[in-house]
Image (tube, rainbow, N blue to C red):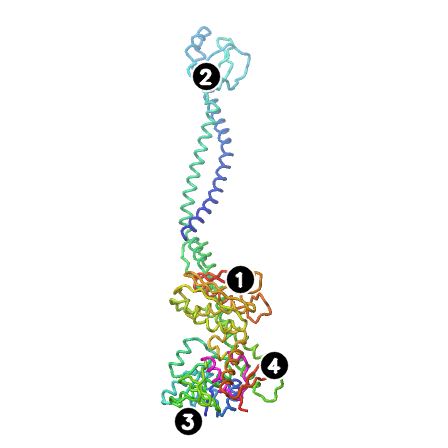
Amino acid sequence: MEQVINGKMNKKLLQKTLNYYFIYALVILITVGPVFYIISNILYEDDANEDLYAIKKQFDKFTKDDLTIMDITLWNKFNRDVNLEKFNGIQKDSLFDHSYYDALTKENEPFRVLNAPVKIEGKWFTFSAKINMVEKENLIGSTVILFISLLVLLIIGFFIITKIISKKLWQPFYAALDKMEQFEIDKSTSVKLIKNTTEEFNRLNSAIDSLIHKNSSIYQSQREFIENAAHELQTPIAIFKGKLENILQRNDLNSEQFKLIDDLNNTTTRLVKLNKNLLVLSKIDSNSYNEIEKINIKDIINNQLTFFNEQALSKKIDITTELSNEVEAKSNHFLAEMIISNLFLNTINHNVLNGQVIIKLTNHSITFANTGILIALQTEKMFERFSKSNPSSQGNGLGLSIIKKIADTNHWSVNYYFMDRMHKFEIVF
Amino acid sequence: MKILIIEDEIEIATSVINYLSSNDFLCESATTLKGAIEKIVLYSYDCILLDLMLTDGNGFKILEALKKQNKTDGVIIISAKDTLETKIEGLTLGADDYLTKPFHLSELLVRIQALVRRKQFNGKNVISFNEIEIDTISKSVKIKGMKIEFTKKEMDLLLFLIGNKNKVLSKSAIAEHLSGDMADMLDNHDFVYAHIKNMKKKLKEMGATDYLKSVYGTGYKWQDE
């Protein structure tokens, strides 16, 4: 699992970096390519010009004075690239490109040509020297090939370097990422991050560390607050309850007063229940129920069945059970009892007169189905504390969150369905 | 019968004393560990009600002190702590019963009665109320010497009512007594009606007087006419 996540992330980051590198390399090469071509062209031309002038210089220095008009034809015959031609009338040195048919390669070849006027025995001639140039198409072609291979080499290089970087340099980052993904505020208290030599990652690690530390301590103090508040409330509730019970014993109470006290009594009972449920929730949070054993779910259901049958009787609810053979699940015993009793209670409290409850236990799941209101419950806030589908109900909105909490603690899942006019809560072990 | 209430919360102690005093109990109270130890050294009690969190120490010290002096006073721990560990620790140290706060005074009363019965009568455990006789060991009920078939719940209910005779009991108190650990789960107490109805019917069939009076529709009172 980790590897997959890691690999996927690696690829993403690598891809992104590579994309930028590729675009950058492409832009550079596309702009540099023509410039390179133009510059090399100019340099090449300059070089050819210099060579041509050098030839001219040599001619002036060593040949010109000895040459006679009679010799010109002969001289021309033995010089392929340097010729003396009939004077063309141009008094200045001129340089130009010209194509000549090459009998050897049987194609036109580009030449750089220097024409200069020379005076031999008082008569003007045009000196013509030419140098074979590289064909333009060839130059472009080789430039393109050069640049493409450069691009390919760069991409391969980038790829390898990025891969090494992301493996080695980013390793602490992925380690931190993994740790954060695994972090659960209600379970772990701190996350061990690997120390490394990169300043940024150390900063990241210390930031994560302080964030987690801060959150954990806030969570911790909030949990402790709920637990302490619930605990501290017990004494005043006990006093209240005791006083009420004593008032109830007075002989001078009239019916109205008695009714008021009885209502207060019932409210106190609700308060006690609310308080106890809050305590249970915060105790599950603080991992107080950590002794895990193999639990026979069927036994737990059967043990509670008598009690809840009795409760169901007043609403004339019929409870049917379909329990498969001994099903064992791993849980804390108290929590297993708690989740089952809350499921039972849920099916009875939200049921209708002459309703029905069906409990079905299979090897991997248990389903409590009950009749009730004929529309499906809203699921998004269902398991939140104090969320009530029916605000006038006597319930405190903690039953389902206790069910969810216990299921989460045991790594079970809770599903809700509304099928065949019945609300179904399924716990999958 | 003499009862010692060791409780630093005076209001709770007062309520308990008020409730118990009218049932032939002689109640004394101590608010600190020190005061409580002085009292148990000097006197013997039929039952000691012990709060665990006292201002000057843990209530478990009382249990140790009793043990040291070989005293056999019955002890019921009344505490807001409801963890299994605390309960087990208390019972291992020699407490006889454990009641988690907040509790119904009527529940406390029957617990004290049961404890006193166990401690004093050594095997003979018959409670009688006029023509009704309940044997808490063989779990049988007799009316005018005739045995009557009672379910466990009905007998429990009868014991609770007789134990709290002349007291007005709310339906929630009866419900909580009958449902024990599951009491916290209850949303309504209508099932109490069914049990009371059945019990009354059986007693009537055997010719017993109807001692159970309904008080303003929602409460009950067991009363000799």
Q: Quadrant of the C terminus of chain A?
A: bottom left
Label count reads 4
Kind of residue at disc 4: Lys
Considering only vertical position in the picture, is A34 above or below A97?
below
User: Which label belongs to residue A422?
Assistant: 1
Q: Tell whether label 1 touches label 4 (CB within 8 Å).
A: no
- Nearer mark to the viewer, of 1 and 2: 1
Residue located 52% across and 17% down the image? A93
User: Which label belongs to residue A259?
Assistant: 4
Mark 3 residue crowding within 10 angstroms, few (<14) / some (14–19) / many (20+): few
Residue located 54% across and 64% down the image? A371
Q: Position of residue B69 (x, y in %)?
A: 36, 90
Considering only vertical position in the picture, is B77 above or below A182?
below
- Nearer mark to the viewer, of 3 and 2: 3
Q: Secondary structure at mark 1?
A: strand
Q: Would residue B17 be visible to someone looking at this image? A: yes
Q: Which residues are magenta?
A: B151-175
Name the dominant secondary structure of the magenta segment. Answer: helix
Q: Chain of mark 4?
A: A
Q: Earlier in the sequence, mark 4 or mark 2?
A: 2
Q: Chain of mark 1?
A: A
Kind of residue at disc 2: Glu
Q: Chain of mark 2?
A: A
Q: Secondary structure at mark 3?
A: helix
User: Which label belongs to residue A107?
Assistant: 2
